[in-house]
Image (cartoon, helix red, strand yellow):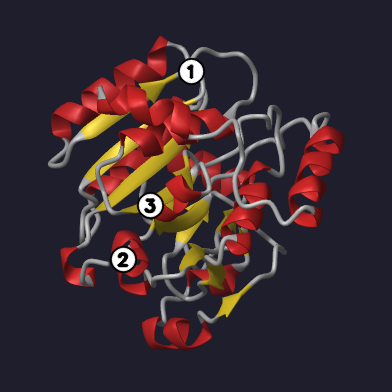
Amino acid sequence: MKPVGQMKCSLVITTYNRPEALDLVLRSAFVQAEPPCEIIVADDGSTAETAMLVDRCRDASSVPVLHVWQEDLGFRASASRNMAIAAATGDYVVIVDGDMLLHRDFMTDHRLLAQEGSFIQGSRVLLSPEITRQMLLAKNLQVPFCEHGLGNRKNALRLPLLSRLLARKCSSLRGIRSCNMSFFRNDCIRVNGFNEDFVGWGREDSEFAVRMINSGVLRRNVRFSAIAFHLWHEENPRSSLPENDRRLFEAMSGRVTFCRNGIGQHLSISAS
């Protein structure tokens, strides 16, 4: 493994037809104290408005910005992430959703906390509908910490030393969320990335974590570092949960470490 100071970190941002939120998230990525080596927008079938936004942002960015798009055939976050990670050139990959506003030290914290044999599960601060509306209208990156309307407010505190003490390895699946997660790219490839059999919202991130843990790459919860603020939105439909829960249970009960329908099919394309 490369020394932390020499490690290249890619930032993958997933999105679907919410360019006003993606615009704010990209702005927060551009002002990172330690920029990623590249920003990859993993687009699950958005319309041309998102492509035009990414083009404009690419012109203003000091780091490469890639737009990896797939046809809109329903919620296919697994395939979208796999395509982006396959295109990544970094040793380490940080993934966030396109509604997660990043603290200025977000990338620095993920890099410094990266540790062989583990992946990072970060936390989030929940913004109310009203605060979200105000920030999107004003294109404001400053979260009003003292106002009402922040859920999980304690997650906005940055205490790096305490964060390191608390970030112990574990195998729990509780609260797995790919909206703020990071891992070594090689570890992801070893388990064949996200399982593209998952279609529709839910559990594809937990099943990915199961295979990582089963392969010996344990989870580390990060609090008080890698801070991100979740812009409010309506909840996604839950109609796919029963089938996705079944797939998750199979991975858990079968001690699965590898999925058949994963990132491998995209690696040959990205390398060609």
Residue 252 position, x and y percent, is 76, 55
Quadrant of the rendered structure where residue 241 is?
top right
Residue furthest to the right in view is 242
Q: Earlier in the sequence, mark 1 or mark 2?
A: 1
Q: Are marks 1 and 2 in contact (CB under 8 Å)?
A: no
Quadrant of the rendered structure where residue 32 is?
bottom left
Q: Nearer the viewer, mark 1 or mark 2?
A: 2
Q: Residue 186 carries which label?
A: 3
Q: How would you rate the neighbour count of disc 3 (Cα within 10 Å): few for under 14, some for 14-19, many for 20 or more?
A: few
Residue 183 position, x and y percent, is 43, 58
Secondary element at tag 2: helix
Residue 126 position, x and y percent, is 60, 56
- Residue 130 in the image: above or below residue 163: above
Residue 76 position, x and y percent, is 60, 26
Residue bearing mark 1: 46
- Residue 105 in the image: above or below residue 230: below
